[in-house]
Image (tube, grey):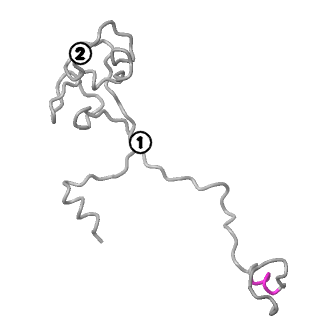
Amino acid sequence: MGDRKYRQRGYQDSDRDRERHEKRPGPRKDYFGPKTPNMPGKREVVRCASCAMVFPLGMDYTGRCPRCGLELHSCKQCAFFDSSARFECTQTITARIPRKDAKNECNFYSPRTTIERETSTSKPLDARQAFENLFRK
């Protein structure tokens, strides 16, 4: 072993080196397969298209948004609104609705719901409190 310049493991290793490496503990044998990831939960929410305020799911969507005043029964809030589709709606409508943020009487209206991950369990009171929580020990 003294005639080699580098101490790399290879085909010229002696039995002494093999015994030293065999004493290391191997991987655990009490589980099978990959570890199951701990994914956060999901929730279904309805948000305002203008200010992103979260609405409760069973709400009546005939009024206005309490924060920004956007009409809730409008094309912008609809699940079928698509700016690349004909008349900007994925449903077959006969006439184009010119103002997408105004209240309309469309029969196809359905509020746009999204699935979001629950990333935190508690919401900070304000921005300063959130900043202080970052550096709390």
Magenta stretch containing residue 25, yes or no? no
Q: Which residue is drawn at 40% across and 44% down?
A: 117
Q: Whole-percent x and y of residue 96?
A: 29, 12
Whole-Å distance between the Cαs marked 1 and 2?
36 Å
In the displayed structure image, the side of residue 72 where residue 90 appears, left or right:
right
Residue 49 horizontal side relative to residue 8, left or right = left
Within the image, what quadrant is residue 26 found in?
bottom right
Depth check: 14 or 19 in front? Answer: 14
Q: Is residue 16 above or below residue 104?
A: below
Residue range corresponding to the magenta coloring: 16-20
Horizontal arrangement in the rendering, residue 83 relative to residue 15 (left or right) = left
- Kindly state the secondary structure of the residue where label 1 is placed: strand
Q: Which residue extends farthest bottom?
A: 2
Identify which residue is drawn at 75% across, 84% down. 20
Q: Mark 2 points at which residue?
A: 98
The image shows residue 99, relative to residue 33, as above or below, that is above
Residue nearest the viewer, comparing 130 with 2: 2
From the image, state whether disc 1 or disc 2 is nearer to you: 2
Above or below: residue 133 compared with residue 82: below
- Reading the chain from its start, which is encountered first: label 1 or label 2? 1
